[in-house]
Image (cartoon, rainbow, N blue to C red):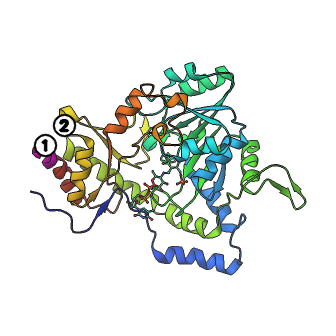
Amino acid sequence: MIDRFDEPIYVTRPVLPPLAAFQARLAEVWSTRWLTNAGEQHEQLGRAIRNYLEVPEVSLFNNGTIALLAAVRALGMRGEVITTPFTFPATPHAISWSGATPVFCDIDPVRLTLDPSLVERLITPKTTGILAVHVYGVPCDVRALQAIADRHGLKLVYDAAHAFGTRIDGVGIGNFGDASMFSFHATKLFHTAEGGALTCGTSENREKFDHLKNFGILNQEEVGEVGINGKMNELQAALGLAVLDCVPEELIRRRAVIARYRDGLRGVAGLTIVAEPPGVESSCQYFVVRIDRHAFGCSRDVVFERLKQYNVFARKYFYPLCSDYECYRTLPSSAPGRLPVATEAADQVLCLPLYGALPLTAVDSIANMVREIQEQA
Ligand code: T4K
């Protein structure tokens, strides 16, 4: 019997920069007495993120959900918006809060992202856009989705909450579609405690996002549209600048953790690792396995519960499907049987702990715990 951990092991832990580095940034904020509304830290972080993600335009936000909401509204996505049920509630909520209706589409069995071959048949005269999710940082089939959007004159927005730094054949993931949303929540590789950003290819769209997140204010006497307060403040931006310096080191550590899991879990019957397709540089946001209950010997839920006894708190991102939530289950697109691939994925996925400070010996133990759970099944 493998010993349980003395301290709880969570699915993730935030990167914390050296306190002195954050304090130095805070000293700059103090010296300016400028706390929010596009201050110096905000401007610096905007430039740094634009460089890091290699995108033409960035608009920073107070969190990823408001950013997504702003994108949906700014791009005029009304009526029906096709999206995935295999995601965090923020994705369909951004559509609903804008007064549009989410239309759930099933996912690809390998990538677990929106299945382009199923999208087209859901398009109706009311459809205005597609909101796709690079779930776990695994990129959607961006080419196929863009072709559909172009064919039908639809807007295409990506929820890239998990995909900070993902590259497809060397191209930053924020360069696809009309806009991409990144979450800078504490649980993300790069974070500002709470925060987010929209990236896009045109200054015209970036200006729309900038206006919307600032109440729709055009100047001191003119308000052009119904905006919201989505601004990132100086304390968030200062933290972000300090955290960004730590990201390269964090990535090295996370890659080592992932490699160790791969070794430790090799050959476990009924367990597969969710991975990016070839040519994709990973954001290392989550380490996700799928448990096939028949081949493994017990269900994902049993593994999840048994790991808790070892003091390991894995997560079932994303179970249940958004289409099963109380607020969405009566939608026609949520009807049972319409989302078989997503339903199976939601029953099988398990996110194991992944963060740079996780010791490799702990990774070995977790892999052995999984093996022990299987033996005892
Ligand atoms: N789209 C997608 C696809 C998303 O996944 C998300 C957010 C969004 C949109 C919206 O972006 P934001 O508006 O959040 O920027 C967490 C995050 O709160 C959420 O940002 C994230 N996705 C989601 C996948 O995970 P919870 O409710 O699972 O978090 P919580 O509090 O249970 O934290 C998970 C673990 O992280 C804890 O067990 C321990 C650790 N933790 C957490 C926090 C907050 C820490 O060690 N320190 C911390 O400060 O939602």
Instruction: Characterize the local packing of mark 2: few (<14), some (14-19) or many (20 or more) Cα atoms within 10 angstroms.
Output: many
In the image, residue 284 lies at what x, y percent? 40, 48
- The answer to if 375 sits in the magenta stretch is yes
Q: Which residue occupies 45% across, 43% down? A: 137
Residues marked 1 and 2 touching at CB (< 8 Å): yes
Q: Is residue 246 above or below residue 334?
A: below
Q: Which residue is mark 1?
A: 377
Q: Nearer the viewer, mark 1 or mark 2?
A: 1
Of helix, strand and loop, which one carries label 2? helix
- Estimate the spatial distance between the alpha carbons at disc 1 and disc 2, rounded to whole Å: 9 Å
Residue 270 seen from this side = no
Q: Is residue 327 left or right of residue 38?
A: left
| Residues shaded magenta | 371-377
Q: Is residue 175 above or below residue 250?
A: above
In the image, residue 84 lies at what x, y percent? 50, 34
Q: Amino acid at mark 2?
A: Phe
Q: Quadrant of residue 26?
A: bottom right
Q: Quadrant of residue 48?
A: bottom right
